[in-house]
Amino acid sequence: MKRIVVTGGAGFIGANFVHHLVAHTDAKVVVLDKLTYAASREALAELPAGRVQLVVGDVAEAADVEPAVADADAVVHFAAESHNDNSLDDPTPFVRTNLVGTFTLLEAVRRHGVRFHHVSTDEVYGDLELHDPIRFTEESPYLPSSPYSASKAGSDHLVRAWVRSFGVAATLSNCSNNYGPWQHVEKFIPRQITNVLDGGRPKLYGAGMNVRDWIHASDHSSAVLKVLQEGRIGETYLIGADGERNNLEVVRTILRLLGRPEDDFDHVTDRAGHDLRYAIDATKLRTELGWRPTFADFEAGLAETITWYRDHETWWRPAKAATESAYSRRGQ
Ligand code: NAD
Ligand code: DAU
């Protein structure tokens, strides 16, 4: 694949993936990104201009999508509205970008016979009980809870329909919660790290018992590239790195790593419809494609991420105050 379009490549995981592509392939990368509040030109700034081109455009606009897709060998689709809390405030951009955007891209790759990889989330499967050995597999039923996860679930269904009805050469992946560099301060881990770096306190929704299955964004990137290169067309691969932790444990670890007492946090208003637990069984990806994560130790990955946020205050600082005012308006 000589020319790869990465939608949402200026966002958190998309940018990590573009770095991964530059380091591990010879492909030319075209980033198609609308540059919403969640995007960052800076995340791509150090990459060689001869390898990475940024095209500012909306995946839900055929006129923006067509020229980018026309001469591509593959499209890897990360672009999305990605934050559950925002989808509870206003679902409108979630439906437009996640559903209409995916539809618009599918029509373009269908016209041009371009390989497509759809990046999705484990949230499409709803949630699991807290103390249950069950984890999500590729066979789990779809049961999304929030406007965000429902819009992602709908986009997955569109991709499978375009494979079956029109023969589009697509694969899908559904990944668990990512952490790492360039994640917006609205998300759980960066919010708590930057609160503490600011001298404030982490904010825990409800009792903090909800469980997420953490994976480093660079491991998500290597898994997506593996599926793009070796995955079977029409197949779905779950991506996860056995990183289950409840939110309280994560907050306590962040406080300890930053030298603060482990009970120095606030309980705030819980999220409406808050999913209890996500957990991924990545056996198919591991056995069929031989993929392995490199960040097997979550605490070491978290410590590295804390250092990154400490070293990149000029990057996250401009978004911090507005993000925190939106949270305080919601009592969070
Ligand atoms: P993000 O919010 O950090 O970045 C999204 C990017 O998409 C931004 O650069 C934004 O400008 C761009 N974008 C938004 N609307 C667009 C539009 N209409 N046209 C073009 N570009 C647009 O998101 P993220 O956390 O990096 O997530 C990326 C993808 O990975 C999403 O599809 C998300 O559902 C999926 N995912 C995320 C996680 C996670 O933990 N963050 C886990 C599993 C799957
Ligand atoms: O599972 C994959 C999903 O992970 C992705 O599809 C989403 O794009 C991504 O945002 C993430 O969704 P979550 O809702 O799980 O992530 P978030 O970072 O918003 O919250 C993680 C957990 O922490 C969740 O249980 C809510 C809780 N939380 C969050 C914030 C922002 C808090 O307790 N306090 C907070 O301040």
Image (spheres, helix red, strand yellow):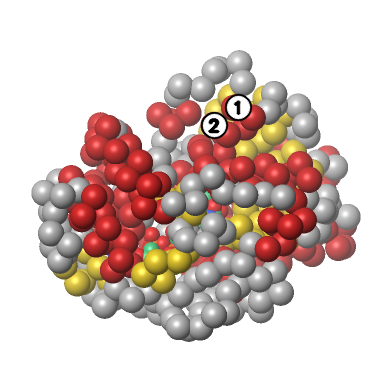
The residue indicated by pointer 2 is 19
**Residue depicted at x 85% and y 42%:** 113
In depth, the one of 37 and 294 nearer the eye is 294
Q: In this rendering, is residue 274 above or below 190?
A: below
Residue 53 is situated, as x and y percent measured from the top left of the image, at 58, 24
Residue contact at pointers 2 and 1, CB within 8 angstroms: yes
**Residue depicted at x 45% and y 83%:** 131
On the rendering, which quadrant does ligand 2 occupy?
bottom left
Secondary element under disc 2, as helix, strand or loop, is helix
Q: CA distance from mark 2 to mark 1?
A: 5 Å
Q: Quadrant of residue 309?
A: top left
In depth, the one of 249 and 73 nearer the eye is 249
Q: Quadrant of residue 265?
A: bottom left
Secondary element under disc 1, as helix, strand or loop, is helix
**Residue depicted at x 60% and y 27%:** 22
**Residue depicted at x 60% and y 72%:** 136
